[in-house]
Amino acid sequence: MTELTYMFAIVAVLAGVVASISVWAPRRLWIKVCALGATLLFIPAAYASMMQLLSMPKPATYEWWHSQTGEATVLGSSMQENEGIYLWLQLPNVPEPRAYVLPWSRQLAEQLQTAEREAAENRSGVQMRLPFEPSLDDREPRFYALPQPAPPPKDYDDPPPQMYEARPQHDI
């Protein structure tokens, strides 16, 4: 959410600069008032549009803030044939997950379905290589299932269990 705050601050400052120029320009008063009013309406409209965009998946080709990410964890997916592949990704060093859309590709959709099936069998997750790089290299799949997680380590620091031996019984 910090990127949104920075982007809105830049938009607000630029709108203030435009308003300042319009106020000090040698124009008629009604033109200056209209320019100032348009600026005052522009700021909440820009904020509302940015907030609306938060709920929509971002095209992966438009990602520039985290464009150098090598891998991402796929938290969820949805595929719409001939429309797009919608992904919910957890990026490294980013606390909140992000929604992205990839252009439709039958090969990518099949890779994703195969990786999700393998992950379900292994009880693991799905990873994505180079999520924001438009690569035509198909030698390695972009989606793959993580290996099955290792079982928890056995704790050998506990004392050995106590052993009880039966005493020999004497006949009376």
Image: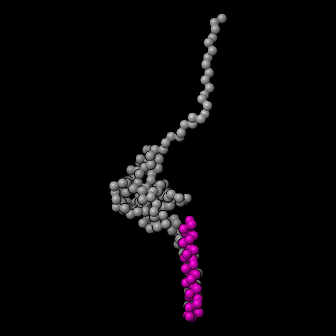
| Number of dots carrying numbers | 0
Instruction: Quadrant for residue 121, please give it.
Output: top left
Task: Give the extent of the magenta segment.
Answer: 1-29
Quarter of the picture containing the N terminus is: bottom right
Q: Residue at x 36, y 54 (%)?
A: 140
Towards the viewer: 43 or 10:
10
Determine whether 172 is above or below 166 in the image: above
Instruction: Quadrant for residue 136, please give it.
Output: bottom left
Relative to residue 51, is residue 137 drawn left or right? left
Q: Residue at x 41, y 47 (%)?
A: 118
Quarter of the picture containing the C terminus is: top right
Residue 120 in the image, given as x and y percentages of width and height? 44, 46
Q: Is residue 26 magenta?
A: yes
Relative to residue 88, is residue 158 drawn left or right? right
Towards the viewer: 12 or 165:
165
Residue 45 in the image, given as x and y percentages of width and height? 55, 76
Res 44 seen here: yes
Residue 25 in the image, given as x and y percentages of width and height? 56, 91
Res 41 seen here: no
Q: Residue at x 62, y 12 (%)?
A: 168
What secondary structure predominates along the stretch shown in magenta?
helix
Residue 169 in the image, given as x and y percentages of width and height? 63, 11
Q: Residue at x 55, y 59 (%)?
A: 95
Determine whether 139 is above or below 2 in the image: above
Which residue, as the protein is rendered here, is positioned at the far front? 157
Which residue, as the protein is rendered here, is positioned at the far top? 172
Q: Is residue 121 magenta?
A: no
